[in-house]
Amino acid sequence: MPFAQIYMIEGRTVEQKRAVIQKVTAALVEATGAPKENVRVWIQDVPKENWGIAGESAKDLGR
């Protein structure tokens, strides 16, 4: 069973997350030949203050 775990800075819409899930699922089906029903995708929203970029938090950088 293919399993994709994706970390993203919080703030994406439900529609954007839905698109990520659909496209990652399709890519895993194509790459592995696994049935679509066996693919799992987990998106974890990370608070901006917990995401570091070049030594600063994404929140402090205005991301």
Image: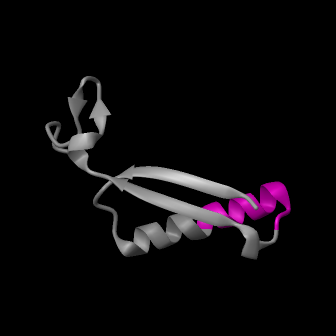
Q: Is residue 52 left or right of residue 2?
A: left
Q: Is residue 42 left or right of residue 34?
A: left
Q: Is residue 32 left or right of residue 10?
A: right
Taken as a whole, is the magenta stretch helix, strand or loop?
helix
For the point 26% across and 41% down, which residue is it? Answer: 50
User: Looking at this view, is 44 or 63 the one in front?
Assistant: 44
Q: Position of residue 35 (x, y in %)?
A: 81, 71
Q: Quadrant location of residue 32?
A: bottom right
User: Looking at this view, is 4 or 60 the one in front?
Assistant: 4
For the point 24% across and 47% down, which residue is it? Answer: 48
Q: Residue furthest right?
A: 33
User: Looking at this view, is 11 or 44 the one in front?
Assistant: 44
For the point 72% across and 58% down, which residue is it? Answer: 2
The residue segment tinted magenta is: 23-34
Residue 30 sits inside the magenta stretch: yes
**Vertical arrangement, residue 42 with respect to residue 5, above or below:** below
Q: Residue furthest top?
A: 55
Q: How is the image coloured?
A: one colour
Residue 36 sits inside the magenta stretch: no
Q: Position of residue 27 (x, y in %)?
A: 70, 59
The quarter of the image holding the C terminus is top left
Q: Quadrant location of residue 26?
A: bottom right
